[in-house]
Amino acid sequence: TTAQKNVRINVEECMNYLTADADPAAIMQSDFVKSHWDLIEEMGTFEYIEDTISLFDDTTWGHVDFEPLLEAVWNEIAIHACHQQRCENYVQLAALVAKTSVGEVRRTLRAIILSTIIRPFHQWAKQVLAERNPDKPPPRRV
């Protein structure tokens, strides 16, 4: 079902939960945080429009332009969901193939076909990560 009400989240409690096992020094040294720290800090100390800000609603930004941070979220963080969603669609498709009462050989061949389709997505993701971080070795897995 679709939610019909706005949900308010205590950001401090949420961030404490999400980062309980995180290394703050490693986070602060990440390229994303370094390049957008001024806007992240501005958002964290936001005191406009009843202290409510939504990165995805520019009417809540007051006099600060958070557009560069918004673009970075879409281009550097949300991009993973798109790749993951493609793979998840194929995982679900593979489960449906098994429900069609076909024999083991046909299911195996269909799985090989699906793997052939998914592999380029995996290789694409590894290439994107390698291009973003040329000084690091490419990841074994994405």
Image (cartoon, rainbow, N blue to C red):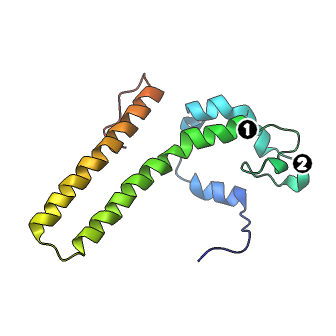
Residue appearing at x 77%, y 43% in the figure: 43
The count of marks equals: 2
Q: Looking at the picture, does residue 135 appear above or below residue 142?
A: above
**x and y percent of residue 30 in the render?**
56, 33
Q: Earlier in the sequence, mark 2 or mark 1?
A: 2
Seen as rendered, the residue at the extreme left is 105
As helix, strand or loop, the secondary structure at mark 1 comes to: helix
Q: Relative to 7, is 33 on the left or the right?
A: left
Asked whether residue 74 appears in the rendered view, the answer is yes
- Please tell me which residue lies in front, 102 or 27: 102
**x and y percent of residue 22 in the render?**
53, 47
Q: CA–CA distance between discs 2 and 1? A: 17 Å
Residue type beneath disc 1: Glu
- Please tell me which residue lies in front, 70 or 139: 70
Residue type beneath disc 2: Tyr
The C terminus is located in which quarter? top left
Tell me the residue that label 1 is attached to.
67
Q: Quadrant of residue 68?
A: top right
Q: Looking at the picture, does residue 68 appear above or below residue 8?
A: above
**x and y percent of residue 81 in the render?**
49, 51
Q: Quadrant of residue 103?
A: bottom left
Q: Looking at the picture, does residue 10 appear above or below residue 116?
A: below
Asked whether residue 24 appears in the rendered view, the answer is no
Q: Quadrant of residue 20?
A: bottom right
Residue appearing at x 55%, y 43% in the figure: 77
Residue appearing at x 74%, y 66% in the figure: 8
Tell me the residue that label 2 is attached to.
48
The N terminus is located in which quarter? bottom right
As helix, strand or loop, the secondary structure at mark 2 comes to: loop
Residue appearing at x 81%, y 44% in the figure: 45
